[in-house]
Each structure stands twice: as C-alpha cells, then as structure tokens.
Amino acid sequence: MPVPLFDPLASQAPLRADIRAAVHRVLDSGHFVLGPEVAAFETEFAAYVGAQHAVGVANGTEAITVALRALGVGPGDEVIVPSFTFWASAEAIPPTGAVPVFCDVDPDTMCVTVDSVKAVMTEKTKAVIVVHLFGNVAPVAEIEALGVPVLEDAAQAAGSTSPAGRPGALGTIATFSFYPSKNLGAMGDGGAITCRDAALAERVRTLRFHGSEDKVDYVDIGYNSRLDELQAAILRVQLPQLDRWAAARAEAGDRYAELLDGVVKVPVPTPGSRPAWHLYVIRHAAADALAASLADAGIGARAYYRTPVHAQPPMAPYAPRVPLPGTDEAARTHLAIPMSAALRDEQIAEVAEAVRAGVSAAA
C-alpha cells in the first residue's frame, strides 16, 4: 500500500468534533484578533514548553525577525545561522538590517555544534540562530556559554525533549511555526515566540503590533504579525495531544533505526535528547536514485535542502567565510522518508523494505 510522506489528517481525525466546536466558539464570540483564545493558548503553550512567556505571531518566519529585533539586532550586526536548514531561518535576518553568517552542521545530527559556531564568531556577532533541525535538539547551552544570545528556531521540534528541557525554553528566545504539517499544526499559518525574560516578551508584544504598547501610541517601527483567534482555538484543541503524538514520532524513529541502521545512515539524536521527529531524514550516497526507487514503490520520500541556503542566489552577498563540509555532505545525501504521529508498524516495515530494495538496486 502507498505510504505518504506526511499524514497530518490521520492524527487530527479523532479531534474533528472538538475542532469544529472551537471554531464555532470563536465565530460566536465575535473576537477574531488577539482575543481570549490567543491569550489562553499563549499561557498554555508557555506552560507546555517550560518558558515563562509565549507570544503568538502570524508565522514562523516573522517570529524569527521579530525575535531578532527584540534582541536588539540591527544594521551592522551579524547573526550566525546554519546553511543546512529551511530558507526562512536565514531569510528572516536581512529584514533586521543584520548580516547572516553561515556556519556548518554535524551531518550525523544535522545540527550546529559549538565548534561550528565558534569558527565564524566575530566581535560583530549579535546572536546565534540554533535550528533544532528535523526535531533533533541542538546543544543550546554550550553555544550560549560562548557569550552571545541564542535564538532557538524550534519550528520543527515541538514535542522534542532534552536533559535541559524542551526546545523553546533552552536559550534566550525561541521561535515556533504552526504550519499545518508541523508537529503541532494549525489549519493555516501561525507561529509563536517564547522566552523567560518579561521585558523581552513585552518587547516582542510591542513589535508584533505595529510597534505599539497600547494600540494608540507608537514607540517603534514594528510588524502586523498576530496569531488569529481561529488558529489559536484550533491549536488549543491539539496541544494536549502533543506529548502523545511526539512519543509516536519518537517510537517510529526508533523502529526505523532498528530496521535501517547499516543499510543507510540514520539520524543520530544529540546526547540525551528524545527527538519528536518532524521529518525522519536518512542519508545515502545515491539519495536521488533511492528517492526514485521509493516513488516507484508508492513510498513518499523527498530531499528538502539539496541546495543549501548559502548557495541560493539571493544569498550571494553573504558567501560563507569558512568551508562547510558537513553542510555539503548533508545536502548531497539526505532523504526524508515517511513520518507522522499516525505511522503504523506495518507501514514502517514496508518503508524499510522498500529502502533496502532501493539501496540494493543502486549498488
């Protein structure tokens, strides 16, 4: 049977009645922007993450730009960011006036390391964006110990855990995306910013609403970036399910690792972490040929970042200052295979068998 790369509807299906009730609750209330649903979700999400504050915004990309601005990032500053990541992690930097500085990743974990960050730090470094890529948990504390604020891009890591806590409560400030395919997905765009500092959270709230503290007077040039009530209500229905969904993703990853380790390179969780895999990304020298073989077998598979961010034409002004061999390796060899909270054991076995057959054919 075909196995899709994503299957978010299967997880949401048992919640449809509750989701409809939440939507009707918003429609009946007449509050559609920054109302009680957003306020309640912010409180509930902050408690879940383990942060003191959560602020809902329009999407995960604007979350990064607003968070950087809240940290005081601006013209003349540099922000370190991995090149093996989704485009938005770096795209969000130039709108602040700062310069993105690309660092390398460990191809086994596909996350930045303290050494890869140190290799590109300068006196102009104002912040480091640490991406919890594919749900793996990057070493935030080690990087923050270098003496610069760390912004966690946790868009793909809702539900992951580490010995130090959950993504979103590990660094100075963190950003989330609630795009529908994410571990915690809305039915449209949405995002959030979490942090532990009250003054920083208030700065975020001001920036998300046009630079206004009271909706009358304006203290800065801000953004119109607000999570709407409908999406907040939908997210509130799903948030209590996130731990169960995260456990299912982690267990599916365990099963894949049992079946595929030695056949392909499987992702390596960072020490002590329990990734709620947003994507389960294997590596193989013939990744594109393997993807074609899987497609023929009805298995969803794709490369996400075959061309790393620094090699995309709009980033030409920000050429890397050091070689990025881990990035090049990960970009060339990675391949995402099916992952969802509803992935069944028999589907995992079917995918693994197709991967084995594809690897044999490519040999």
Image (cartoon, rainbow, N blue to C red):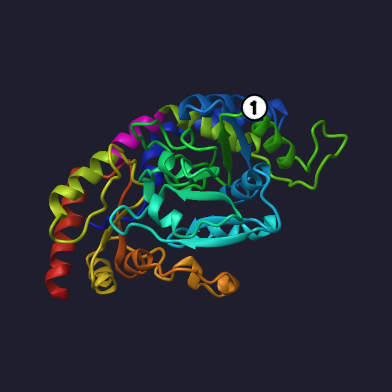
User: Which residue in the rendered view is the most extreme toward the right?
Assistant: 217
Whether residue 12 can be seen here? yes
Q: Main secondary structure of the magenta part?
A: helix
- Residue 135 quadrant: top left
180 is higher (above) or lower (below) than 320: above
Span shown in magenta: 241-249
- Residue 273 quadrant: top left
x%, y% of residue 91? Answer: 58, 60
Determine whether the residue tagged by mark 1 lies in a helix, strand or loop.
helix
Camera-nearest residue between 241 and 99: 99
Camera-nearest residue between 215 and 36: 215
Q: Residue at x 43, y 47 (%)?
A: 156
Q: Is residue 248 magenta?
A: yes
- Taking the image as shown, residue 252 lies to the left or right of residue 198, namely left
x%, y% of residue 86? Answer: 48, 58
Amino acid type assigned to the residue bearing label 1 in the image: Ala
Camera-nearest residue between 150 and 255: 150
